[in-house]
Amino acid sequence: MTDRHLTIDYIEYTSVEEMEPQDRELVAAALEARSGSYSPYSHFQVGAALRLEDGTIVKGANQENAAYPSGLCAERTAMFAAGALHPDLAFDTLAIVGADHGVVCDDPATPCGACRQVMAEYQGKGGRPLKVILVGKDRIYKFARVDDLLPFIFDSLKA
Ligand code: THU
């Protein structure tokens, strides 16, 4: 028997000004993307902005439905749009921001498990790390790869 430990690395910024210009641009796009949120049930607006390998930014926002499970998170809206529109471009960085009744949350909104699984799939498809930025009012987290949000990623090729 062996006790093993996993370490998760991420960067915490206290302000967007501390970030690289490209990341700042993506955070701004995620904030803008919230305007596309259709959230009459939760009143929780989530914006996502995905940078592709050629610099293209694809935005997404959560889409709710009276039949609740039929809705979709902002992250998957952006990733599926990018996958459908630009199937040959790898995903580079995904920025996510959550706002409750229009007010950006103090702490970063963290993606649900299903969105993490979809991130993992596209990271594998692209063959390069997908960086993830989680934006809050008081702090911003940056992860260098999806593995740091979803350890032990399922890989059917390895299973
Ligand atoms: N939501 C997202 O868009 N992304 C997440 O990672 C978690 C939750 C949405 C779904 C729903 O429209 C609202 O936030 C409240 O759960």
Image (tube, rainbow, N blue to C red):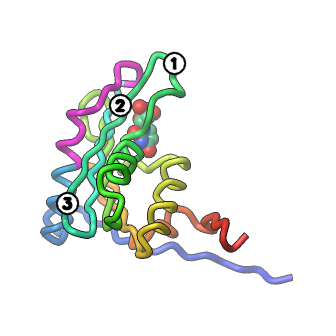
Do the residues bearing badges 3 and 1 touch, measured as CB atoms within 8 Å? no
Residue 116: x %, y % from top left: 50, 55
Question: Measured along the vertical axis of the image, is residue 69 above or below residue 27?
Answer: above
Question: Measured along the vertical axis of the image, is residue 80 above or below residue 39?
Answer: below
Q: Residue at x 55, y 62 (%)?
A: 150
User: Disc 1 residue type?
Assistant: Ala
Q: Residues within 10 Å of mark 1 (few under 14, many from 20)?
A: few
SS at circle 2: strand
Residue 117: x %, y % from top left: 54, 55
Label whose residue precedes the other's in the sequence (2 or 1): 2
**What's drawn in magenta, residue-wise?**
30-42
Residue 117 relative to residue 110: left or right: right
* Quarter of the N terminus within the rendering: bottom right
Name the mark nearer the viewer: 3 or 1.
3
Q: CA distance from mark 3 to mark 2?
A: 26 Å
Residue 1 relative to residue 128: left or right: right
Label whose residue precedes the other's in the sequence (3 or 2): 2
Depth check, front residue: 151 or 121: 121
Q: CA distance from mark 2 to mark 1?
A: 17 Å
User: Disc 3 residue type?
Assistant: Thr
Depth check, front residue: 26 or 43: 26
The residue beneath circle 1 is: 67
The residue beneath circle 2 is: 44
Name the mark nearer the viewer: 2 or 1.
1
Q: Residue furthest right?
A: 1
Q: Is mark 2 within 8 Å of ligand 1?
A: yes
Residue 50: x %, y % from top left: 29, 56
Q: Quadrant of the rendered structure where residue 60 is?
A: top left
Depth check, front residue: 158 or 117: 158
Q: CA distance from mark 3 to mark 1?
A: 33 Å
Question: Measured along the vertical axis of the image, is residue 88 above or below residue 27?
Answer: below
The residue beneath circle 3 is: 56
